[in-house]
Structure formats: structure tokens, C-alpha cells
Image (spheres, rainbow, N blue to C red):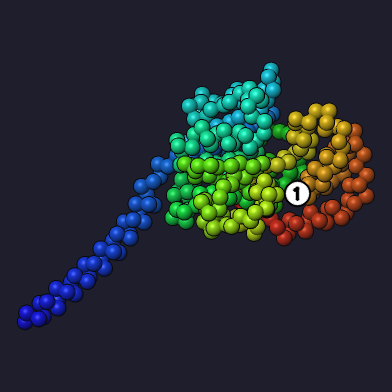
């Protein structure tokens, strides 16, 4: 009888230990999943001549769940100011730095400055341009970042997709999501969200990096990415293979033909018009992403006083190449603005 009692007690002890382990794992996962939804997320960006879309940009990201937006206004004195576009209800959530030309020479300086001055105040920092919109698939930003998939990640890389121009020649005042819809061409280049409290962080042209032994880089589903020692890939944030399963950047790179031309005039002044090859290279990229039409060619020739003979002579080849890319390398989903 005494032996039976000891046997039963030993079995109960084993069951109790097993139950404790199961419950501890359950509560650990549950606490991780739900207790840290108060994480703070900041956004750092730099803008020039972006007032047409600045209000939409700010509203989109605050609705997405960004807690504070830091904008480095690269406009010259006595020109438009991004601060003029901020609604009163958002002013406590947006900081605009103006007259930055004396200490900010390029975008990487702005992002580094933003991170160094605030890296203890926020859990994550999203670094994007003002024509780039992070899209989370079937989730909220903070629940996405709070996933156990990213516990060990210091950098999360998001691939970009570029919507076509819907054959729009001129600007109109509808939202970007109304004017430019899919298909979205997938791109190798990426943008990054960075965990706070990382020391000795470096920022290149488009992408942050540090010692791979010290910090872990992940893709949008939490898989670790090993960054090879390739300066070009680091500088331009190129990651292969492309993955857009859980999150990606919608890059409204070109918009309408009119806006495309205006974009590549920014900051170049007379240099822009003296180096026509620069524009021709950008036009090749434009027609890689957007359907070539005679209307667009004529419009560009008329506005910039260029002769686009190459594009006229190779019209069919350029058109067929565009159609091929749409069929093989596009993302076809219905995007709903947050």
C-alpha cells in the first residue's frame, strides 16, 4: 500500500513539473505577444519639394501606428516649407528640422542624426523617403514588430514595389493610392527598420549596417539575412531573393509623367540640363516600370526640348519588355490605404 502511494506521488510530481513547463512556455509566449504592444516606433525621413504629398505621408504613417515622425526639410530658404502641411492635430507627433544645409549634406547624414539623437527614446526606427509607404499585410505595425519572428532581429529589411503610372500624364489632387494602382513591379532594393539602442551604427547611402557578428539582419518574415561584404549592395540596399510575404515598401517613384520630369529636376539646376545622358538613363528606368506611349514621348520632348529618337526607334522592344516584366515580376494584390 505504501509503495502504491509513493508511486502515485512520483507520477503526480512528474505531471506537475510537465504542466509547469507547458504553462511557463504558454505564459512566456502570451506575455511576449501581448505585453509589449506599447513599443514606440519612430520614422526618419528627408524631403525636398514634397508639399503636394506631405500631408498624406504624415497621415498615412500616424494611422499605421508610427508614434513620432522626424522630417529633415531640405528645401532652400524662402521656398516651400514642409511644416506648412502639418495639421494641428499632428503637430505633437511631428518634428521638422529646417535650414539643415549647414550640417546635413546628404540623406545618410539626416538618418544618422535622427537615430543618434533619439535612439534611447524609441524601440524601432523606420528610415524611408517621402514617396515610400510601408505596407503591412493583414496586420498592424506594432503587432507585426512584436511577433516572436523578430525577437533576435536588429534590422528588418523590406523590399520595394513600384506601381505603374496608370498612363497619367499630369498631376491631379487625388491620393496616391487612388491614382496609382497595381500591378506593382517588385524591386531588389530595400529599406530598413532599425531596433533602438544599437551602438556604433553606420548609415550609407540607402541602408544602415554594422558588424554582422554584433547585429542580426532579417527579411520581412524574420529569416536571417547574411550581408556579404559588398560596398555596392550595402550602399544601395540590394537584397536577393525578393520577399514581400508579410510587409513591403510601396515606392511611388515616378507618379505621372509631369511629376517624373519635375522630380529629376530637383537639386540639379543647370547641371541637369547640361548632362542629358543622366535624364536618358532615368527615362529608361521610367519606361521599364511604365508603359511606353507616343503621348508620353511627345510630352517629354516638348517639356525638356529633347529628341527621344532612341525611344521612338525601339518603341516595340521597350513595350514588349515592359509587358514581360509585368507578367513575370509583379505583385497583384488589392492595396488598401491605412
Question: Which residue is depicted at the point 45% across and 53% down?
Answer: 151
Q: Mark 1 points at which residue?
A: 289
Residue 38, image x, y percentages:
40, 41
- Disc 1 crowd rating (10 Å Cα; few below 14, some 14-19, many 20+) is many
Query: Taking 64 as reference, is 80 above or below it?
Result: above
> The C terminus appears in which quarter of the rendering?
top right
Front in this rendered view, residue 48 or 262: 48
Question: Which residue is depicted at the point 86% across and 32% down?
Answer: 273
Residue 225: quarter of image: bottom right
State left or right for residue 217 relative to residue 258: left
Query: Taking 292 as reference, is 95 above or below it?
Result: above
Q: Is residue 293 visible?
A: yes
Identify the secondary structure beneath mark 1.
helix
Front in this rendered view, residue 117 or 295: 117
Question: Which residue is depicted at the point 44% across and 55% down?
Answer: 148
Residue 70: quarter of image: top right
Amino acid at each position: 500500500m505504501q509503495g502504491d502511494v509513493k508511486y502515485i506521488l512520483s507520477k503526480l510530481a512528474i505531471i506537475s513539473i510537465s504542466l509547469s513547463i507547458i504553462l511557463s512556455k504558454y505564459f512566456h509566449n502570451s506575455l511576449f505577444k501581448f505585453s509589449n504592444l506599447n513599443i514606440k516606433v519612430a520614422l526618419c525621413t528627408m524631403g525636398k519639394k514634397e508639399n503636394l504629398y506631405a500631408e498624406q505621408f504624415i497621415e498615412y504613417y500616424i494611422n499605421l501606428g508610427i508614434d513620432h515622425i522626424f522630417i529633415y526639410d531640405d528645401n532652400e530658404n524662402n521656398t516651400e516649407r514642409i511644416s506648412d502641411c502639418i495639421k494641428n492635430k499632428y503637430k505633437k507627433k511631428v518634428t521638422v528640422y529646417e535650414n539643415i544645409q549647414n550640417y546635413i549634406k546628404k540623406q545618410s547624414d539626416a538618418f544618422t542624426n535622427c537615430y543618434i539623437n533619439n535612439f534611447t527614446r524609441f524601440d524601432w526606427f523606420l528610415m524611408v523617403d517621402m514617396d515610400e509607404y510601408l505596407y503591412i499585410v493583414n496586420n498592424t505595425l506594432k503587432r507585426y514588430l512584436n511577433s516572436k519572428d523578430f525577437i533576435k532581429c536588429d534590422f528588418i529589411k523590406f523590399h520595394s514595389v513600384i506601381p505603374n503610372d496608370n498612363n497619367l500624364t499630369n498631376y491631379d489632387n487625388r491620393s496616391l493610392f487612388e491614382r496609382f494602382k497595381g500591378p506593382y513591379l517588385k524591386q531588389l532594393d530595400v529599406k530598413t527598420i532599425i531596433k533602438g539602442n544599437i551602438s556604433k551604427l553606420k548609415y550609407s547611402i540607402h541602408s544602415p549596417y554594422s558588424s554582422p557578428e554584433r547585429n542580426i539582419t532579417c527579411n520581412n518574415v524574420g529569416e536571417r539575412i547574411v550581408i556579404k561584404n559588398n560596398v555596392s549592395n550595402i550602399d544601395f540596399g540590394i537584397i536577393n531573393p525578393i520577399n514581400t510575404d508579410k510587409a513591403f515598401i510601396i515606392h511611388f517613384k515616378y507618379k505621372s509623367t509631369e511629376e517624373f520630369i519635375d522630380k529629376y529636376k530637383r537639386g540639379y539646376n543647370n547641371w541637369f540640363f547640361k548632362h542629358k545622358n543622366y535624364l536618358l538613363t532615368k527615362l529608361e528606368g521610367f519606361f521599364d516600370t511604365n508603359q511606353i506611349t507616343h503621348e508620353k514621348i511627345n510630352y517629354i520632348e516638348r517639356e525638356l526640348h529633347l529628341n527621344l529618337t532612341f525611344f521612338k526607334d525601339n518603341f516595340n522592344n521597350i513595350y514588349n519588355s515592359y509587358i514581360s516584366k509585368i507578367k513575370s515580376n509583379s505583385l497583384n494584390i488589392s492595396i488598401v490605404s491605412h
